């Protein structure tokens, strides 16, 4: 069970970090793509699993964001990744990656991938990242 304080800090981080600058039209196109994927594959287009990876880095804020943007295309290419949010948490050097997966199988494949294995080195992570997995019960908007 995710603590209330943790969820609030992640949500605040997402809001403060400013997610992508997608226009309403792009968002609409993403929804159409997700619905088509559901029809073709039978997998949830809105996501069934949330993965939250919290980490502390020795990198400056600018460098951490630069590296995240540099690596973003690799994450965009991941099969089954519906969305990823990059969040800055309150304390200096603390960040979170919030992933929405179409299935537990897609999450498992990612966790076993080389890309996942490179996260600690790519961000000069201090200590072990904290990883939480949650089943998505429902979403407010489509």
Image (tube, rainbow, N blue to C red):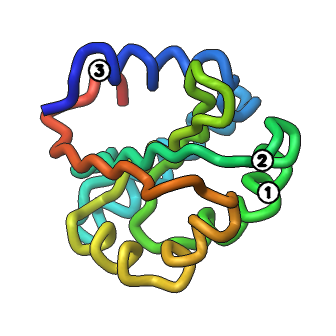
Q: Residue drawn at (43%, 49%), measured in percent from left and top? A: 53
Q: Tell me if mark 1 has few (under 14), some (14-19) or many (20+) residues whose alpha carbon lies within 10 angstroms of its own.
A: few
Q: Tell me if mark 2 has few (under 14), some (14-19) or many (20+) residues whose alpha carbon lies within 10 angstroms of its own.
A: some
Q: Which type of secondary structure does the marked residue at label 3 adopt? A: loop
- The image quadrant where one finds the C terminus is top left
Q: Nearer the viewer, residue 29 or 45?
A: 45
Instruction: Provide the residue designation for mark 3.
Output: 140
| Vertical relation: 86 (above or below) 101 | above
| Vertical relation: 78 (above or below) 142 | below
Mark 2 and mark 3 lie on one chain; the one further toward the N terminus is: 2
Instruction: Provide the residue designation for mark 2.
Output: 59
110 left or right, relative to 114: left
Instruction: Provide the residue designation for mark 1.
Output: 67
**Which quarter of the picture shows residue 26?**
top right
Q: CA distance from mark 1 to mark 2?
A: 10 Å
Coordinates of residue 124 in the picture (x, y in percent): 68, 60
Q: Which type of secondary structure does the marked residue at label 1 adopt? A: helix
**Which quarter of the picture shows residue 135?**
top left
Q: Which type of secondary structure does the marked residue at label 2 adopt? A: loop
Look at the numbered discs 1 and 2 and tell me whether their residues touch, using CB distance below 8 Å: yes
Mark 1 and mark 2 lie on one chain; the one further toward the N terminus is: 2
**Which quarter of the picture shows residue 91?**
top right
18 left or right, relative to 8: right
């Amino acid at each position: 069970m995710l603590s209330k304080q943790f969820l609030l800090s992640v949500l605040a981080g997402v809001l403060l970090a400013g997610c992508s600058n997608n226009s309403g039209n792009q968002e609409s196109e993403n929804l159409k793509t997700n619905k088509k994927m559901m029809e073709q594959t039978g997998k949830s287009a809105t996501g069934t699993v949330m993965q939250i990876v919290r980490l502390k880095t020795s990198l400056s804020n600018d460098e951490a964001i630069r590296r995240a943007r540099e690596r973003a295309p690799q994450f965009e290419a991941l099969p089954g990744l519906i969305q990823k949010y990059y969040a800055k948490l309150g304390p200096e050097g603390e960040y979170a990656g919030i992933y929405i997966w179409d299935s537990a199988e897609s999450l498992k494949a990612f966790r076993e991938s080389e890309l996942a294995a490179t996260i600690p080195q790519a961000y000069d992570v201090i200590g072990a990242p904290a990883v939480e997995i949650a089943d998505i019960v429902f979403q407010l908007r489509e």
